[in-house]
């Protein structure tokens, strides 16, 4: 079974938040037209479109990330509509005054499964007391995971719209995730994009902490920062260090009409086929590990 551990739920609320950053006279509709992207409609409409997209590409299940702080309700609506297909993640700014309550409500009442931290975006270090408070809430909820974006952070839609991205990438160090993972050893931590340029640090952290997992999502264009590095070598090295049971396939798919990024899947499957790993190990990466961390709703 093929599952995708990393997709973004670009809801109407997401675009409305971006429009506010553009100025009072900008609407979400203005952004759809400028980007030439489809209007997502209601959360129910977008959830149905995602379900059809998964069907069209033979994808069993997918994680959908609420991609702006405060948009938990949109993804909660989507997963309630398709609980056997969709798993809800949500972005949180730990500096928000209601961050603790939002975390508790999202994971215990709204049915979301993973707290997503973007320290470079929100300027809150991983060792900060505000981060620790929300991770502690997640750690107390059985089955909840913590996703931490590390390394280089580039948000394509912000770049397309000319919105500033004043991210402090010094704060996204996978070694900081290892400190959290050691503090909360029963909680699963997810580091996307193989650490997004900090592969060495991500592998060190994961080698030290058995509860740190890496996702394979996106084009992984960060490999250009290391001369001669290829994605084939990234997979080979990650498999040698953490093994197949802690790698989760993902695409970083987001908007429509582009939809699910089949080319990313084909590229990564070709790499796995070329490495000659066992069929059962390939199955873990492409879907089994996701099902283990996020069991299907009954």
Image (tube, rainbow, N blue to C red):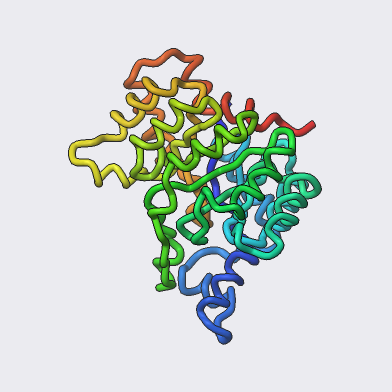
Viewer-proximal residue among 272 and 208: 208
User: With 132 as the anchor, is 160 left or right in this view?
Assistant: left
| Left or right position of 75 against 261 | right
- Residue 208, placed above or below residue 68: above
In the image, residue 15 lies at what x, y percent?
A: 58, 68
Across and down, in percent, residue 56 comes to: 57, 40
So how many labels did they put on this image?
A: 0
Residue farthest toward the bottom in the current orientation of the protein: 25
Look at the picture and state if 116 lies above or below 231.
below
Quadrant in which residue 98 is drawn: bottom right
Residue plotted at (58% across, 24% down): 288
Closer to us: 213 or 255: 213
Q: Where does the C terminus fall, quadrant-wise? A: top right
Q: Is residue 44 visible?
A: no
Q: Residue 78, position in %: x, y?
A: 71, 50
Near-viewer residue (196 or 98): 98
**Residue at the (57%, 77%) spot, across then down:** 20
Residue at 59% x, 51% y: name it: 131
- Asked whether, in this view, residue 166 is left or right of residue 177, the answer is left
Residue reaching furthest to the left: 227
Residue 297 left/right relative to 70: right
Q: Residue at x 60, y 33 (%)?
A: 188
Location of the N terminus by quadrant is top right
Q: Position of residue 66 (x, y in %)?
A: 62, 54
Q: Is residue 174 visible?
A: yes
């Amino acid at each position: 079974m093929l599952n995708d551990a990393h997709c973004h739920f670009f809801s109407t609320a997401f675009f409305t938040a971006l429009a506010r950053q553009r100025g009072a006279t900008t609407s979400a509709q203005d952004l759809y037209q400028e980007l030439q992207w489809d209007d997502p409609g209601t959360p129910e409409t977008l959830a149905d479109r995602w379900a059809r997209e998964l069907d069209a590409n033979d994808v069993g299940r997918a994680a959908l990330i609420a991609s702006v702080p405060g948009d938990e309700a949109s993804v909660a609506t989507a997963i309630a509509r398709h609980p056997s297909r969709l798993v809800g993640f949500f972005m949180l700014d730990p500096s928000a005054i209601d961050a603790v309550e939002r975390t508790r409500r999202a994971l215990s009442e709204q049915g979301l499964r993973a707290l997503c931290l973007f320290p470079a975006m929100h300027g809150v270090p991983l060792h900060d007391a505000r981060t620790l408070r929300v991770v502690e809430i997640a750690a107390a909820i059985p089955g909840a995971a913590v996703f931490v974006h590390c390394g280089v952070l580039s948000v394509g839609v912000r770049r397309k719209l000319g919105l500033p991205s004043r991210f402090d990438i010094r704060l996204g160090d996978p070694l900081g995730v290892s400190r959290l993972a050691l503090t909360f050893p029963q909680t699963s931590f997810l580091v996307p994009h193989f650490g997004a340029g900090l592969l060495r640090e991500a592998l060190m952290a994961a080698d030290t902490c058995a509860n740190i997992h890496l996702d394979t999502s996106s084009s992984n264009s960060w490999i250009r920062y290391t001369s001669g590095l290829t994605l084939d070598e990234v997979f080979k090295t990650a498999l040698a260090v953490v093994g197949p049971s802690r790698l989760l396939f993902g695409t970083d798919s987001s908007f429509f009409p582009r939809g699910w990024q089949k080319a990313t899947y084909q590229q990564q499957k070709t790499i796995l086929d070329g490495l000659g790993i066992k069929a059962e190990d390939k199955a873990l990466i492409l879907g089994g590990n996701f099902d283990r961390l996020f069991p299907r709703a009954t």
